[in-house]
Amino acid sequence: MRRFRVLNLPDLKLGLDDLLSKRRGALVQSNVGKSYEAMLVHKRDAIDALPSALTGGKPLADALFAADTHHDGYGAAIYFITEAYLRLPAPHPDVIDAIRRVRAAFIPELEQLRDSYADEAEAAIRRKAELPQLEADLKLIPVAGGSLYDWAVAFIGAGEKLAALLSQRADVDTNGRKGAQLLRSETVGMLNRLRDAIADEMRVAHLPKDLDAQIFGYLDDLEAQRAAALRASKPAKPDASAPTAAEA
């Protein structure tokens, strides 16, 4: 009897979704399958409730880097367009006053874009509160696709995204990972017990001979792919018969 051993949480998420939708008809042909269905739904829902970083979503480090790149890009654009206005030899006084207010509120120094993710996220919350008072000033400055107000909204939005991702990272702490791994092992164990019980039922009941493949075919494919990936990730063992550097 084939066993599931190396399925991870993303595999289980995919496999249970498939089992409880496309393969449900095969599952409930068996009395054992019917009795397990509610428990499998419970495990699937528990896996779905985990943070996406644990179930195959974009890694948090990559997501944070992408949000920070977006944030710093808009921040630098706002800084340099205000810098250009401030360097004009004969600017309109009203425009310059607006530019100075925007610069002071959003990006007084370019060096601020080197701040930590947490500091940038906190600053975004503060800037959002000040946005209504600066809306007229921002809309006074045209940019490609609209006004400086549009850039400011995008700048703040990227900072808020950083805040949300930092909160998500806090949720995925050591205890959260331990709980997720316990859920993984419990689910794998349940699938193996279900498979054994269906095999027992098939010996005494009139069920399709290929029912095991109908129910577990996709999970078997995921198991095989995961096992192959794990083998490929391990460094090759040195050939004991090959001469060493000292012997060569």
Image (cartoon, rainbow, N blue to C red):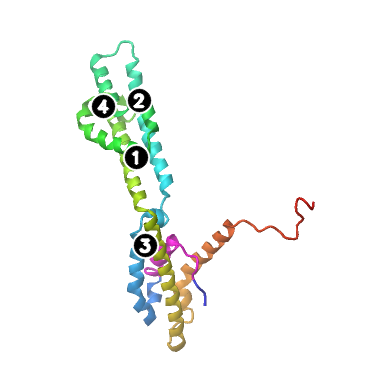
> x%, y% of residue 202?
45, 84
Q: CA distance from mark 1 to mark 4?
A: 25 Å
Question: Tag 2: residue type?
Answer: Glu
**Residue lying at the far top of the rendered structure:** 90
Q: Quick one: label 3 or label 2, which is nearer the N terminus?
A: 3
Mark 1 or mark 4: whose residue is earlier in sequence:
1
Name the disc covering residue 138, or none. 4
* Label 1 secondary element: helix
Q: Residue at x 40, y 60 (%)?
A: 178
> Percent x, y for residue 39?
34, 72
Q: Residues within 10 Å of mark 4 (few under 14, many from 20)?
A: many
Q: CA distance from mark 4 to mark 3?
A: 45 Å
- Dot 1 corresponds to which residue? 118
Instruction: Select label 1 or label 3 by which is in front.
Output: 1
> Which label belongs to residue 47?
3
**Which residue of the protein is positioned furthest toward the front in this rendering?**
246
Instruction: Please state the horizontal and vertical placement of residue 219, each as a whole percent of the image.
Output: 46, 68
- The residue mark sitting in front, 3 or 2, is 2
- The residue under the point 35% across, 15% down is 87
Nearest to viewer (mark 4 / mark 3) = 3
Q: Is residue 85 above or below residue 59?
A: above
Residue 192 falls within the magenta-colored stretch = no
Chain part drawn in magenta:
4-22
* Circle number at residue 128: none
Cα gap from disc 2 to disc 4, whole angstroms: 18 Å
Residue at disc 2, secondary structure: loop
Q: Is residue 20 left or right of residue 229?
A: left
Using the image, determine if residue 20 lies above or below residue 28: above
Residue 240, placed above or below residue 5: above
Report the residue at 75% width, 53% height from top. Answer: 244
